């Protein structure tokens, strides 16, 4: 009887654990680009980045998809309203825009968004991004 209840608990744990991790609904027959576009459309940026992590980063098409995913992730983080999580969302956005600039230093959208976020922080003297986020910004040429 004791073994049955342990197996029952294990089964329930595995069931609920697997239910908590939703995977994006993406057609497996699509090209990598189409899959990424679909994941971006579903706001599944982490899943898109995970899928792209297994691809050749030296491939210009993969680099373009990574740039696109990071940029959309950052924009989504900025534009999702949750006042209680504003600092977390802005840190996420800044990290994503930093990743964009590592891939393409000429990306003007990422640069403009970083300047916009940091401009808002300048109006709040006792608030700002986390130190590791600032370090990442310095790595791509911003001195905050």
Image (cartoon, rainbow, N blue to C red):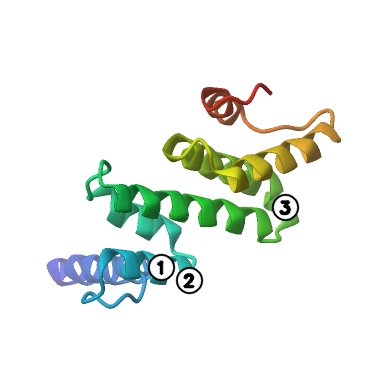
Q: Which mark is residue 37?
A: 1
- Number of disc labels: 3
Q: Is residue 50 toward the left or the right of residue 111 in the image?
A: left
The answer to whether the residue labelled 1 contacts the one labelled 3, judged by CB atoms less than 8 Å apart, is no
Residue 42 visible, this angle: no
Residue at horizontal 67 percent and vertical 59 percent from the top: 79
Q: Is 99 situated above or below 75? A: above
Residue 117 visible, this angle: yes
Q: Quadrant of the N terminus?
A: bottom left
The residue that disc 3 covers is 84
Pinpoint residue 119: horizontal percent, then vertical percent: 78, 37
Q: Secondary structure at mark 2?
A: helix
Residue at horizontal 35 percent and vertical 47 percent from the top: 63
| Mark 3 or 2: the one toward you | 2
The residue that disc 2 covers is 41
Specify few, some or many for label 2: CA neighbours under 10 Å numbering under 14, 14-19, or 20 or more: few
Query: Residue 117: which quarter of the image?
Result: top right
Q: Earlier in the sequence, mark 1 or mark 3?
A: 1
Pinpoint residue 44: horizontal percent, then vertical percent: 44, 64
Query: Residue 129: which quarter of the image?
Result: top right
As measured in the structure, the alpha-carbon distance from the residue carrying label 1 to the one carrying label 3 is 29 Å
């Amino acid at each position: 009887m004791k073994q049955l209840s342990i197996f029952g608990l294990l089964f329930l744990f595995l069931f609920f654990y697997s239910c908590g991790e939703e995977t994006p609904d993406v057609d497996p027959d699509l090209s990598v680009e189409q899959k990424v576009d679909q994941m971006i459309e579903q706001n599944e940026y982490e899943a898109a980045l995970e899928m792209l992590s297994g691809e050749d980063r030296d491939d210009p098409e993969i680099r373009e998809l990574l740039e696109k995913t990071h940029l959309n992730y950052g924009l989504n983080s900025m534009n999702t309203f949750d006042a209680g999580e504003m600092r977390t969302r802005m840190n996420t956005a800044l990290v994503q825009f930093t990743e964009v600039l590592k891939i393409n230093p000429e990306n003007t959208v990422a640069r403009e968004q970083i300047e916009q976020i940091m401009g808002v922080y300048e109006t709040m003297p006792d608030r700002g991004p986390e130190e590791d986020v600032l370090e990442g910004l310095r790595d791509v040429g911003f001195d905050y």
